[in-house]
Image (cartoon, grey):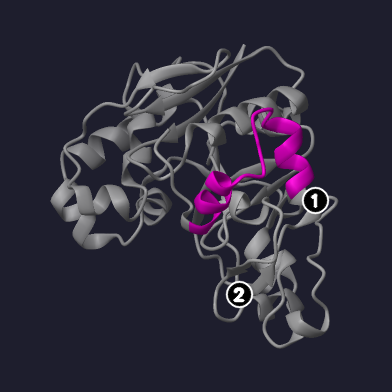
Amino acid sequence: MVTVVCTRWLDAFPASYVTVLRNAVAANLKRDHRFLCVTDNPGGLDEGVEGVMMPDLGIPLRYQRHGCWPKLSIFQPGLLPPSDATLYLDLDVMVRDDLGVFFERLEARRGFHALREWNPTLWSLVPLAYRPHRGVQGSILGFFPDEQADLFEKFVTNQAAVFESYHLDQDFLTEHVRDPQDWPFEWTASFKWHCLKYFPLNKVVPKIKEPRTAKVVVFHGSPGPIDIVPLGSYRWGTRRKFGYGPVDWVRQYWLRHDPTWKDDSENLRVSATGRRTA
């Protein structure tokens, strides 16, 4: 048995994100597994998702809303099965291919496995070995809970100092995890860095590239996956990287894994804000 875990707190993601991730994991992981959601609000979670109450770490609200610090609650001793290989996934990732290889690599090498933070686009012209290593990108983490339990102690006993020293939770992880390992670079893709083009090239070639070989596509920043699912001619993205209307391969993924989706005004509103509490 292995464990897949996600986190959800405050109003950052609707419960439908958990359903989509759970269904995508089930479709791409043949091994027996538990799917856990560590959350401060278990309401709305579907069957097949084990809701685990998120421990109150006393994190000030401003740090709950910025930096993903509540994610570190997954390292509280006893919260997760201590000796099971564990894969943490952010709610806004797209699982598109076999997750078994992540567990195989984790079991073969142990340690703490994470994405290597991506370099900006121009660095793609430089071989990977010569790009600056920017530390942990926190969307996909692999670990054995009993081997990383001291992370929790380091955080909860020194919160004020941690917040002063580190901008994001992944910066803290970069400095404090035991035996850090990088996931193979080709297993994942960033929607922002690998699929979008800068303005004005995105106006000349508006089609959004699909990273067909990536097992997991990570959304970080704007847009989120739910922003590019609804039908319509709306604009999404940032000032320099943007597009219009649904992205067909993201929409197909979402409709496949969210049986309740409807192209109605409520979902259009959610896509514009990225937030819903139910």
User: Would you name the residue on which mark 2 appears?
Assistant: 120
**Element under disc 2:** loop
Q: Main secondary structure of the magenta part?
A: helix
Locate residue 23, reporting x and y percent: 67, 26
Does the magenta segment cover residue 261? yes
Identity of the residue drawn at 32% across and 26% down: 54
Residue 272 as seen in the image, left or right of residue 241: left
Residue 41 as seen in the image, left or right of residue 48: left
Q: Quadrant of the N terminus?
A: top right
Locate residue 214, reporting x and y percent: 78, 49
Question: In the rendered image, is residue 119 in sight?
Answer: yes
Circle 2 Cα neighbour tier, 10 Å, few/some/many (<14 / 14–19 / ≥20): few
Does the magenta segment cover residue 176? no
Q: Quadrant of the C terminus?
A: top left
Span shown in magenta = 251-272
Name the amino acid, label 2.
Pro
